[in-house]
Image (cartoon, rainbow, N blue to C red):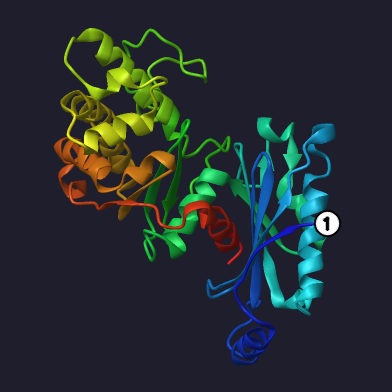
Amino acid sequence: MYRQISPVRETADLQKYQKNRKDESEMGLYCFGIDVGGTSVKCGLFQTDGVLVEKWEIPTRTENQGEQILPDIAESILNKIKEKNLKKEEVEGVGIGIPGPVNEKGEVACAVNLYWGFKAVAKELGELTGLSAKAGNDANVAALGEAWKGAAAGARNVILITLGTGVGGGIIVNGQIVSGFHGAGGEVGHANINHEETEACNCGNRGCLEQYTSATGIVRVAKKMLAATDEASTLRDADPLTAKDVLDAMKAGDALAVKIMDEVGEQLGGALAVFAAVVDPEAIVIGGGVSKAGQPLLDCIEKHYKKYAFSLCKDTPITIATLGNDAGIYGAAKMVL
């Protein structure tokens, strides 16, 4: 069972593509990109040139420690191959993004939202489908998607920061995901930026980037600044106060909201300058719900990034992600190419 999202290519177009590509290389004509979330699994069938043929969703069945998640995905892939009259040898493989640390072998130690303990994701999915399979952390995979076909298309060195309820990230170096030894590469939200912080982050440490620049972090900063001054602000009427309230007030010229977002920009811009000194990216991409604020948010970040960045990195473009919720399936597909 799956919910159809968007048929992009008709059968006649696929046949034409197959005819034109079949002698070009030994690479398969198609690949699958899978993005596993806590409630649904996004699936995409791609041509290996990056054209999205079709995307759809299936439920994420987390009961019984999520034992049916990978079998459900495999069944959906095999059904799609049959539906499209594809041959397995025409499929280069399947990539999958997982919400948890994934090492270079495609193994996850723990995926809390899926109720998984250790799982050899790539190995198991490969056995279930009979296809070559690779797995990665979902944020890293999304970064690869933006580097392939999104805001940083064509770049081989990219930093992606996602600003949502928490702060996630992905790092691409020389076209490859940096997963690290423990699969924790790109966990930029838990980089320490304030040694004096007394309140704990959800991870247990204190002073993490996430505590200041996530949606909840922005609200936290705003509440502290509101409590520290009697300055008039439209934010005092917001109940409950949200990050969107702060961003909207900033865009409307509310003086205190501007100061709040300048503080957020100081923290994020400074952190990005440190990350850039390590990675030397061609582009920095900002995604997640907070990124919907657009250019005013970028202005807050760029002001401080340029102040702190190493001289050779000061002009690195900072852009808003463009693939939205499809970044994961694009990046997952790219992993197998």
Which sits in the foreground, 101 or 295?
295
Q: Which residue is mark 1?
A: 128
Q: Quadrant of residue 16?
A: bottom right
Instruction: Provide residue 222's location: percent of width, then percent of height.
Output: 30, 20
Type of the residue with mark 1: Leu
Quarter containing the N terminus: bottom right
In the displayed structure image, the side of residue 186 where residue 280 appears, left or right: left
Q: Residues within 10 Å of mark 1 (few under 14, many from 20)?
A: some
Element carrying mark 1: helix
Image point (16%, 14%), residue name: 231
All told, the count of numbered labels is: 1
Image point (37%, 18%), residue name: 207
Instruction: Provide residue 233's location: percent of width, then percent of height.
Output: 21, 21
Quarter containing the C terminus: bottom right
In the displayed structure image, the side of residue 37 where residue 225 appears, left or right: left
Instruction: Provide residue 89's location: percent of width, then percent of height.
Output: 75, 77
Image point (74%, 31%), residue name: 115
Which sits in the foreground, 147 or 293?
293
Image point (47%, 31%), residue name: 166
Q: Quadrant of residue 175?
A: bottom left
Q: Is residue 38 visible?
A: yes
In the displayed structure image, the side of residue 213 where residue 21 appears, left or right: right
In the rendered view, would you say 138 is above or below 32? above
Instruction: Provide residue 22's location: percent of width, then percent of height.
Output: 64, 88
Q: Quadrant of residue 103?
A: top right
In the rendered view, would you say 103 is above or below 79? above
Residue positioned most to the front: 237
